Image (cartoon, coloured by chain):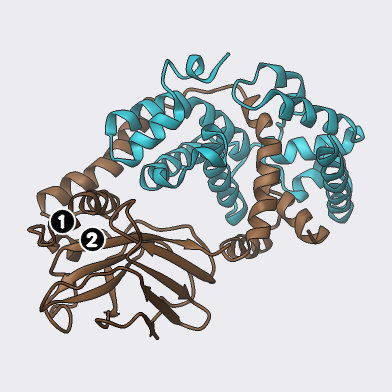
Amino acid sequence: MNEELDIAAAEYVLGTLPAAERARFASRLAAEPELRDAVRFWGARFFPLDEAVPPEAPPPELWGAIERQTGARETAAAAAGATDVVSLRRRLAFWRGAALAGGALAAGLAAFTLLDRAAVSDLPAAGRYVAVVDTGGREPALIAEVDTATGLIRVRSLAAETPEGRSLQLWHIAEGQGPRSLGVLQAGSEAQTIQDAPSAGPVDGLIAVSVEPPGGSPSGAPTGPVVYSGRLIAVE
Amino acid sequence: MDQRAATNGFSLPGLLEATSRGDRAAFRNLYEATAPKLFGVVLRITRNRSIAEEVLQETYIKVWQNAERFSPEAGQPLAWLATIARNRAIDRIRSEHTERITNVGDENVLDRLPSAAEADPATRATLRLCLSGLDEEARSCVLLAYCSGFSREELSERFNRPVGTIKTLLHRSIKALRACLEQE
């Protein structure tokens, strides 16, 4: 790889890049796998130095603070019938497993509308992302490609099945945010392009597909069960 | 010492996996098994106890939220956790002017490498060998930067050299290390 970039990666890991350069470098990581590889190389090679640092007991009250900040959110959310994105993901995992089997589902998605927007993702930069959207380990139903540079999302349907008299609606659920509609999947079309990619910037989270009334959710938030979902990953 | 022995009988990948499923007991065990190590690491970098505590707290909140992103194939769990903690700590001390004790720094960390628990012994031996190949001042710069969070400016002060010279020294050391690490 380019020697200059390799040096920047090493300095990023060493921590000696000045703040602005550090931020610039970090913002390139999501879109540039070569840089990520270099950072991984240096991180793994220097890691023995971390191990050599003697452990130091953190103050006992620190765990309580962590527990409050991670647990309080869940407890409050559960009380309100809502959820944060962490438990949302877990719930999605559950749905993925349980969902499609029967075709018709009882699980409503009211929880979707009350997500905690406080959780912040660190993933920087723009680029191309892909999500293999499936029912959880089974064969992919569709593939969604997100290109934040052009603002396009391409959806290729492989085996997505639209229940009789309903529409399938595509959602992007960024980390720490509520689901944003990406549009309704056209029944019978194999590939479809949506001019509505998440704006340049962090792209992460899930692509999910819910069953909605014909033409899509009337409320702007998912109302029917999630039948497919998949995590967005940066394209190598 | 194997990994299990180092973490009171728990395997770190198992704890991370359970944490990603929302298992709070696993999350607590993960914290107890790894927090002292990470606290040691961030304390060295931030050189400020209250900032180190905040960084550690942010680190574990992030771990709770992102545990599912860990993949056992990608490397050691402790290295994954340490990366999150290190990046938080460095971002913190670089982005704001914080009160730090500057009269510290650990240049003898190499002597302690053999006691390390998780890293592959070959990686350890190679690192030691390659660092030993640098001249003393260059080696100290690299170690003070990585282990103690020294900026180029702080290194310049410590070694009484212009910042530009330190930058050149770091770059030369990195090139030499890359060549050596790849060869070994």
Crowding at dot 2, Cα within 10 Å, few <14 / some 14-19 / many 20+, comes out as: many
Q: Is A236 left, or right, of B136 in this rendering?
A: left
Question: Label 1 is placed on what type of residue?
Answer: Ala
Q: Is residue B94 above or below residue A156?
A: above
Q: Amino acid at mark 2?
A: Leu
Which chain's colour is cyan? B
The residue pinned by badge 2 equals A115
Task: Determine which residue is flagged by label 1.
Answer: A82
A165 or A225: which is nearer to us?
A165
- Chain letter of disc 1 in the image: A
Look at the image and give the colour of chain A.
Answer: brown
* Percent x, y of residue A193: 39, 84
Label 1 environment density (alpha carbons within 10 Å; few <14, some 14–19, many ≥20)? many
Same subunit: marks 2 and 1: yes
Chain letter of mark 2 equals A
At horizontal 78% and vertical 58% (from top left) the residue drawn is A1
Q: Real-space Cα distance between discs 2 and 1?
A: 7 Å
Which of the image's four quarters has the C terminus of chain A?
A: bottom right
For residue B182, say whether it is visible: yes
* Residue positioned 12% across, 63% down in the render: A110
Closer to us: A196 or A211: A211
